[in-house]
Image (cartoon, rainbow, N blue to C red):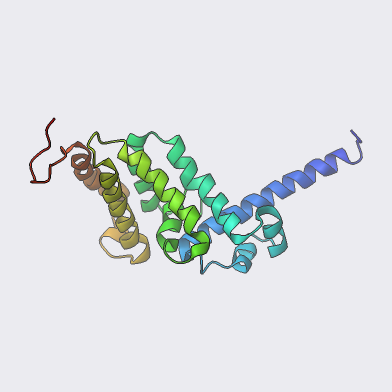
Amino acid sequence: MDEATGPRTADRRRDAAATRLRILHAARDLFAERGYERATVRDIAERAGSNQALLFRYFGSKQGLLTEVLARGGLEQVRATPPEELFETALRSMLTNSSAGTADRSLEVYLRSVGRGEDAAGTLRELGEEYQRALASLSDAPDGPLRADLSMAWLLGIGLMRTVVAREPLAGADPDEVCRLVLATLAHLWAAPAEGPGGAAGGP
């Protein structure tokens, strides 16, 4: 290795990696705060202290940036978290103000962006499907996917009321207290027996 150029090459790589990470964090926060459509490439680059040319160089497009934000956050979280811990982990991430840190904000991105443009639809749909599959495995009932969707609807509804509408007392409630109340009720959803068409619990 050329000793004169080797250290400079390593420095450039470190700088590039740091810039890339700043862009990802800026995009994560702006997508969570404004939604995919309203978070412009220019604003993301400015918040990252970078420029649009580097953003496109590293991620190819705004959609490519969203894909990586979700891959590094929500999809990674779903795949690394045991299903029985996933709902609480996701709930706590939405209840905790993570805008200044590096915590996952994928469900906030999902909440503010889903249904608001075809550009991001496929990536957001993948995240929702990954959550559904993981949560559906918590119930032995044949309607496990429905139960998973109901739990997701509750999770996103809590996020909507707390972070978007900012409705009190939920907006200012202690995360531990919210988790205690929600998880105690949610346990019945996973444990409740399936019912047949007539309303009675299904049998063999």
Q: Is residue 56 left or right of residue 5?
A: left
Residue 78 at what x, y percent from top left?
Answer: 43, 41
> Which residue is painted at 53% across and 56% down in the image?
28
Q: Is residue 172 left or right of residue 22?
A: left
Q: In this orientation, which residue lies closer to the viewer: 24 or 36?
A: 36
Residue 112 at what x, y percent from top left?
Answer: 42, 62
Q: Is residue 169 above or below residue 142?
A: below
For residue 161, say whether it is visible.
Answer: yes
Disc count in the image? 0
> Which residue is painted at 34% across and 48% down in the image?
91
Furthest-top residue in view? 204
> Which residue is painted at 30% across and 49% down in the image?
149
Residue 115 at what x, y percent from top left?
Answer: 42, 64
Which quarter of the picture shows residue 161?
bottom left
Q: Is residue 114 left or right of residue 19?
A: left
- Image quadrant in which the N terminus is located: top right
Q: In this orientation, which residue lies closer to the viewer: 81 or 3?
A: 81
Q: In this orientation, which residue lies closer to the viewer: 184 or 35?
A: 35
Q: Is residue 55 above or below residue 2?
A: below
- Image quadrant in which the C terminus is located: top left
For residue 26, say whether it is visible.
Answer: no
> Which residue is painted at 68% across and 59% down in the image?
56
